[in-house]
Image (cartoon, rainbow, N blue to C red):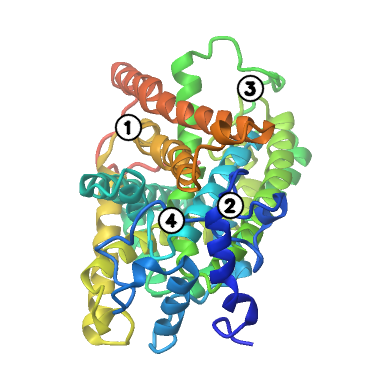
């Protein structure tokens, strides 16, 4: 039975209307219980927080703003089916393939990302016309156009710097594998190679193809970290061993400063807080109500796999021999073998963020044009050119920024503070307000108080990132310059492990 014709979907408008009257007091779309946190066709969608954005085309019906979110989604699917290039083609399994690339290294971060992603998902269900986080930014802040532009700037900068990171990591891999070979300007040359390869893999226009690459990259990542764990346990001694036994502690080693500790956490957060991409994933799902299944599958796998891997590798390597990435702590042969299985992920993650950025620009250029949904020379030439521009910029960033690690921490404090925390705390309260009243005020339930407090904490964490995190990062950059640790621009020297 087709998505549009199913009896379940046909009755959703009535269910939506009933839900709008009752309101949602649990912080998830279905007020009937916690089971809706796992998604599916029975999820009841709450009311919108505002009208459809004027910049988004969803058809010619003049009264579309008065219809339910289900009707808007059905209209999008019907229009999509008439074109050669179909965007809403992802099932929850394919979306899981995309999400598996967003590796989260701690249980705490995983829990926060899981919850805020569910809030984001609820918001996207209520407003299925949004295509990216920039639309959400505008809607959250009372439909102000400055909010859209501010979010757009942060969105594009964040994604481009992540692309630059993967150009740098790709060059690091090639330098590691060819350390004994005579190569010209090593890091610059390898950066060009990686940027070109990533650009080519970015060319697919929909996430349907990228989801297959994402699933493959998840498998190879699993093999890579599994091998690294085994090698760390069986090698005679860690790389760089100086005769001192590995030091393993449950807390940071003596001498670790606040700036160093917070900088390390921000660096990790920059790479692994991935909510910025989720609206684009949800926008291409045939049934967005299935999104939590992909989210839970990804999160559970990440917590189990990477918590165990991190603990085991650290137990054998210790503080003084640990490197970033951890492959550098292994003996040369082990290092090269395990690092090699990370190639698909090195390419795919950069490709993913490039595709999200390109879609953001491409859809604005051809919003109401046939070039968006048909195979035309103009459409493909524009898409290819946008991607090429993002990868050229990413390559330049990877080569020019002399304090790349600290810059990642700075970007995390400035951007993840919003995309990882503040946005979704605000979204929670805006949706509760649209339900009729703030839950903690109206219902006085324990769950209402707890969820309200949790979202206040999430906003406070975001503000902490934005203020204290920015301060710590600037201090770290100053220290790097003072100690001479800053590398030169367009450096030919190897950056291999």
* 433 vs 369: above or below: above
Q: Residue at x 72, y 20 (%)?
A: 245
Camera-nearest label, 3 or 4: 4
Q: Earlier in the sequence, mark 3 or mark 4?
A: 4
**Label 3 vs 1, first from the N-terminus:** 3
Residue 312 locus on image (x, y percent): 74, 36
Which residue is at the front of the view, 361 or 261? Answer: 361
Compute the Cα span from label 2 to label 3.
67 Å
Pointer 2 residue? 22
Location of the N terminus (image quadrant): bottom right
Residue 17 is tagged as none
Q: Nearer the viewer, mark 3 or mark 1?
A: 1
C-alpha span from label 2 to label 1: 53 Å
**To which residue does mark 4 refer?**
48
Can residue 460 be seen at all in this image of the molecule?
A: yes
The residue mark sitting in front, 2 or 1, is 2
Structural distance between the alpha carbons of marks 3 and 4: 62 Å
**Above or below: residue 170 compared with residue 93:** above
Query: Which x, y percent locates residue 348?
Result: 48, 61
Query: Which residue occupies the foreground of this view, 215 or 50?
Result: 50
- Looking at the rendered structure, the secondary structure element under dot 1 is loop
């Amino acid at each position: 039975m087709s998505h549009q014709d199913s009896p379940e979907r046909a009755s959703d408008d009535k269910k939506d209307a009933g839900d709008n009257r009752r309101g949602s007091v649990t912080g998830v779309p279905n007020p009937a219980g916690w089971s809706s946190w796992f998604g599916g066709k029975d999820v009841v969608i709450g009311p919108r927080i505002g009208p459809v954005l004027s910049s988004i085309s969803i058809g010619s019906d003049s009264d579309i703003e008065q219809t339910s979110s289900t009707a808007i989604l059905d209209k999008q699917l019907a229009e999509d089916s008439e074109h050669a290039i179909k965007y809403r083609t992802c099932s929850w399994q394919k979306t899981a393939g995309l999400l598996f690339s967003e590796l989260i290294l701690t249980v705490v971060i995983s829990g926060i990302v899981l919850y805020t992603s569910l809030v984001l998902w609820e918001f996207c269900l209520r407003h299925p016309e949004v295509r990216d986080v920039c639309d959400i930014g505008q809607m959250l802040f009372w439909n102000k156009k400055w909010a859209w532009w501010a979010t757009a700037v942060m969105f594009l900068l964040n994604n481009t710097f992540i692309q630059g990171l993967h150009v740098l990591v790709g060059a690091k891999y090639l330098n590691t594998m060819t350390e004994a070979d005579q190569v010209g300007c090593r890091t610059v040359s390898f950066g060009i190679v990686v940027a070109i390869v990533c650009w080519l893999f970015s060319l697919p226009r929909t996430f349907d193809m990228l989801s297959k690459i994402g699933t493959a990259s998840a498998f190879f990542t699993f093999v890579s970290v599994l091998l690294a764990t085994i090698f760390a346990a069986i090698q005679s001694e860690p790389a760089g061993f100086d005769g001192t036994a590995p030091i393993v502690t449950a807390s940071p080693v003596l001498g670790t400063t606040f700036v160093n500790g917070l900088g390390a956490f921000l660096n990790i957060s920059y790479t692994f807080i991935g909510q910025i991409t989720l609206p684009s994933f949800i926008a291409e799902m045939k049934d967005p109500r299935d999104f939590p299944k992909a989210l839970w599958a990804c999160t559970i796998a990440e917590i189990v796999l990477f918590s165990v891997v991190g603990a085991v590798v650290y137990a054998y390597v210790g503080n003084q021999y640990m490197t970033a990435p951890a492959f550098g702590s292994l003996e040369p042969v082990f290092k090269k073998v395990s690092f090699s299985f990370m190639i698909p992920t090195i390419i795919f993650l950069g490709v993913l963020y490039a595709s999200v950025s390109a879609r953001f620009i491409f859809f604005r250029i051809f919003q109401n044009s046939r070039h968006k949904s048909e195979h035309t020379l103009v459409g493909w030439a524009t898409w290819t050119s946008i991607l090429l521009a993002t990868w050229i910029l990413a390559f330049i960033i990877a080569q020019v920024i002399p304090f790349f690690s600290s810059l990642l921490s700075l970007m995390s404090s400035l951007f993840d503070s919003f995309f990882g925390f503040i946005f979704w705390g605000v979204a929670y309260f805006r949706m509760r307000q649209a339900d009729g009243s703030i839950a903690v005020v109206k219902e006085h339930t324990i769950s209402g108080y707890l969820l309200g407090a949790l979202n206040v904490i999430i906003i406070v964490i975001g503000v902490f990132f934005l203020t204290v995190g920015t301060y710590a990062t600037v201090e770290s950059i100053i220290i790097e310059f003072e100690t001479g640790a800053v590398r030169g621009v367009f450096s030919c020297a190897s950056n291999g492990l």
